[in-house]
Image: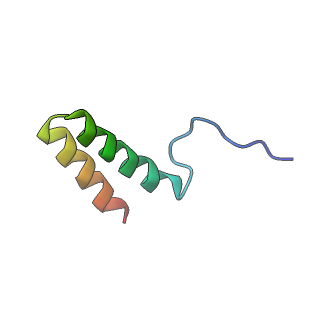
Amino acid sequence: MAKKAKNKTGSGANIKTNASRRLERAKRLGKSENYIKDLEKHLSKLH
């Protein structure tokens, strides 16, 4: 039985989820505008 890869960003469909989750967290924690813009740019590339 194949082992499930752990802690590897970049497992297919997971990237989008991770990115959006990070974006939500950044907004909640009140990160800098630039950081949030950067994440949004990254997300838009993935769609």
Q: Position of residue 8 (x, y in %)?
A: 56, 39
Furthest residue in direction front, as rendered:
28
Residue 32 lies left or right of residue 2; in this view the side is: left
Q: Position of residue 40 (x, y in %)?
A: 24, 53
Q: Position of residue 24 (x, y in %)?
A: 32, 46
Identify the residue at image location x=37%, y=60%: 46
The correct choice, above or below, for 47 with respect to 37 in the image is below
Q: Position of residue 38 (x, y in %)?
A: 21, 46
Front in this rendered view, residue 12 or 31: 31
Furthest residue in direction bottom, as rendered:
47
Identify the residue at image location x=29%, y=61%: 44
Number of marks in the rendered image: 0
Residue 3 lies left or right of residue 45; in this view the side is: right
Residue 29 lies left or right of residue 13; in this view the side is: left
Residue 15 lies left or right of residue 20; in this view the side is: right
Identify the residue at image location x=32%, y=56%: 43
Identify the residue at image location x=19%, y=35%: 30
- State which quarter of the image contains the C terminus: bottom left
